[in-house]
Amino acid sequence: MDTLEQARQRIRDDGVQYLLVQFVDIHGAPKVKMVPASHLDDVAGEGAGFGGAAVQGLGQGPHSHDMMARVDLDSYSVAPWTEGLARFASDLYVDDAPHVYCPRLNLKRVLSSARHEGYVFNVGIEPEHFLVTKNADGSLSVWDPNDVDTLEKPCYDFKGIANVMDYLRDLMDGMARIGWDVYQSDHEDANGQYEVNFVYSDALTTADRYTFFKMMTSQYAQRRGAVATHMAKPFADRTGSGGHIHFHVADADSGDNLFLDEDDRKGLGLSEFAYHFIGGVFEHAPALCAVNSPTVNCYKRLQVGAGLTGTRSGFTWTPAFVSYGDNNRTQMIRTAGPGHLEDRTVSAACNPYLAMAAYLSAGLDGVRRKLDPGEPNLGNLYDLGLEEIRRRGIRQLPQTLAEALVELRNDEVVQGALGPIYDEFVNLKEAEWREYHSRVSQWEIDRYLTMF
């Protein structure tokens, strides 16, 4: 762990004059206070103070004592899009006590509990996002500077990625500059959609990096006159954006991958521990959905029956059923290699601190209870049809935020993973659902205005 003097030396070596003391609200949106680097001691000791009631979901009112964002020295990163600026992720304190509504501290609590049992949660993430522009009427268009990103199946298209290569190079160069091992990028399945992959780490580091990644995309896109959006489904006729997680649990002492078993009778290279973990995720999948897909918009990428329809490319690439299989992208959980699992249902709009805390708690509940996920589903799940899927007893994920919140209200394990944040989260999300249903959309006007 970095000491205060080591942090000071880094700041001097990097020529940093200002610090972004960064934390997140309940939605995972990055918030900051800007502090001269000469005041590092203040924000490392007491913290950067602010009014917590001004930030959504932090459990404070206008009368509450100051909230203090106290930096984690190990999270230091220069801000690669500019000069003389660095960022620290921070934890929230009130009256010198850890604030129970802090999503980052909540994840640390869950990870500490897992470590006490002998486990470390290692996670990577696929950060899909769109580059868009806003039109005068408020609608969105794909940012397409050379008017070439028009294919129905644009995934991996050379012209499509060359169209935004300066943005991607800026982003990847910036990530490399701060020590992330960036290993590939691509044009994704939707027009205007991209992904940049970096090597996985422990869950806290990955959650910090995903948050900082979103900050970086906003700044590099802005340079090009675009908006980087991590909204799950900005276009009705295009594939949505996921924050697919790749993960395994490791032994806290040896670092060995506890998911790995080369002698797996099912041929997936997974251990009994891994199958029990999957069983726990499946047991709590409906409630997890509320945390992993926490907005009204997220459910427009999780629609049953939309696997082969509803997008220009022909696929949504988003499984809507509780299932696992081999290296097969039609499943909720894909075995991406021996001892290596991927959950494809997680939304780009999730708060990664809450999502990872809930996911690990669900999986370890399966380990403790030795839950069986059943046999893997092989082949193309999209081809089975709803009747056959139901005949096989494969459950579907909630189809609206309201359905997912009902499941969350009945799931004590996922509630426990959120701790005191649970009540605040549910109240805010139920209010979001009510507000959504109070609005009259253009679709309703077009469909019903002269129907009767």
Image (spheres, rainbow, N blue to C red):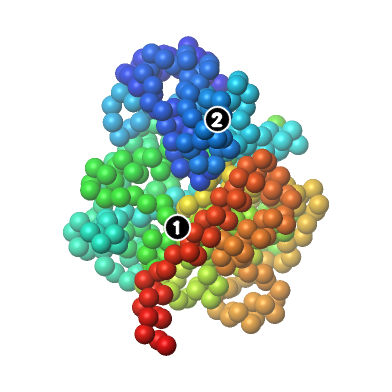
Q: Farthest residue to the left: give it.
A: 146
Task: Point out the tag, 2 or 1, that comes first from the N-terminus.
Answer: 2
What residue would you read off at disc 1?
232
**Residue 442: where, in percent of width, then height?**
36, 71
What residue would you read off at disc 2?
63
Tag 2 near tag 1, CB within 8 Å: no
Identify residue type, mark 2: His
Q: Quadrant of the N terminus?
A: top right
Q: Farthest residue to the top: give it.
A: 5
In the image, 108 versus 153, the foreground residue is 108
Q: Name which residue lies at 67% across and 77% down.
A: 390
Q: Name which residue lies at 60% across and 20% down.
A: 96
Q: Name which residue lies at 41% across and 52% down.
A: 230
**Residue 210: where, in percent of width, then height?**
47, 42
In the image, 408 versus 8, the foreground residue is 408
The quadrant where residue 404 appears: bottom right
**Residue 276: where, in percent of width, then height?**
74, 54
The quadrant where residue 391 appears: bottom right
Q: Name which residue lies at 52% across and 33% down.
A: 62
Task: Look at the numbered disc 1 and give the secondary structure of its residue.
Answer: loop
